[in-house]
Image: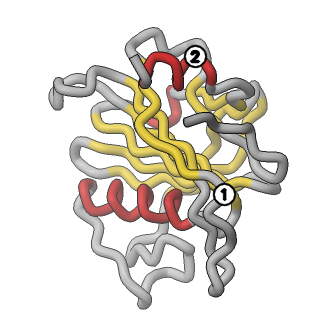
Amino acid sequence: MSFEMPPDWCVFGLDDSWTGEVRLQGYSQGGGDEPSGWRSDHVTIQYGRVHDHQAPSVHVVSAPRLGESALRMLHTGLSKAGFEFGMSGTGHVSGAPVAPDRTTVSLEGDLVAADVWRGAKIEVAWVETADSWIAVAAPRVQVSSLGLTRIRDLGPLLAARNR
């Protein structure tokens, strides 16, 4: 299977400051818009050792705005951080009962706004761009130490995945 870079949203991953393992965990493209307006397109990239649950790792999910996969990663990360979520939240798209810390992360070298929730062993971040949603779940890693960058070619990750 191939993946064509989407024309209407961007794929993001960690910048070159991450020197560990990188793996394309999954992607979906061309599923079309859901009747509700939600979209199923996404790319998930995992950073860190896949089978070492004690090592630092980062999952980055990129999706178009209203991308359900980015929201699902946000909810998974919040659950791992010990936050429950539901419709009675703080008004944030996450549904979390606790408001996030508003901070900044590096995106393409510029500082952009990010919502971050901190659990005992995981930090979860939510970043919105003009056309994309980005969810980051980072066990044993401080989100503020990460830099995000646009991924313009998934070819090397696809080739490694298909070996």
Name the residue carrying label 1: 30
Q: Vertical placement of 21 versus 124: above or below? A: above
Q: Vertical placement of 73 versus 161: above or below? A: below
Marks 2 and 1, how far apart at CA: 21 Å
Residue type of the residue flagged with mark 1: Gly
Closer to the camera in the image, 16 or 156: 156
Residue type of the residue flagged with mark 2: Pro
Q: Identify the secondary structure beneath mark 2.
A: helix
Q: Vertical placement of 60 versus 55: above or below? A: below
Q: Residue 149: x percent and y percent? A: 68, 28
Q: Residue 39: x percent and y percent? A: 63, 68
| Picture residue at 28% right of the left edge, 51% below the top | 119
Q: Identify the secondary structure beneath mark 1.
A: loop
Closer to the camera in the image, 94 or 59: 59
Which class describes the residues within 10 Å of circle 2: few (<14), some (14-19), or many (20+)? few
Toward the front, the furthest residue is 1
Q: Residue 141: x percent and y percent? A: 36, 31
Task: Say if mark 2 contacts mark 1, CB within 8 Å.
Answer: no
Quick check: 93 left or right of 53? right
- Which circle marks residue 39 in the picture? none
| Picture residue at 68% right of the left edge, 73% below the top | 33
| Picture residue at 34% right of the left edge, 22% below the top | 48
Which class describes the residues within 10 Å of circle 1: few (<14), some (14-19), or many (20+)? few
Name the residue carrying label 2: 156
| Picture residue at 65% right of the left edge, 69% below the top | 66
Quick check: 35 left or right of 74? right
Q: Vertical placement of 11 versus 41: above or below? A: above
Toward the top, the furthest residue is 19
Could you tell which of marks 2 and 1 lies nearer the N-terminus?
1
From the image, state whether disc 2 or disc 1 is nearer to you: 1
Q: Residue 120: x percent and y percent? A: 22, 47
Closer to the camera in the image, 120 or 84: 84
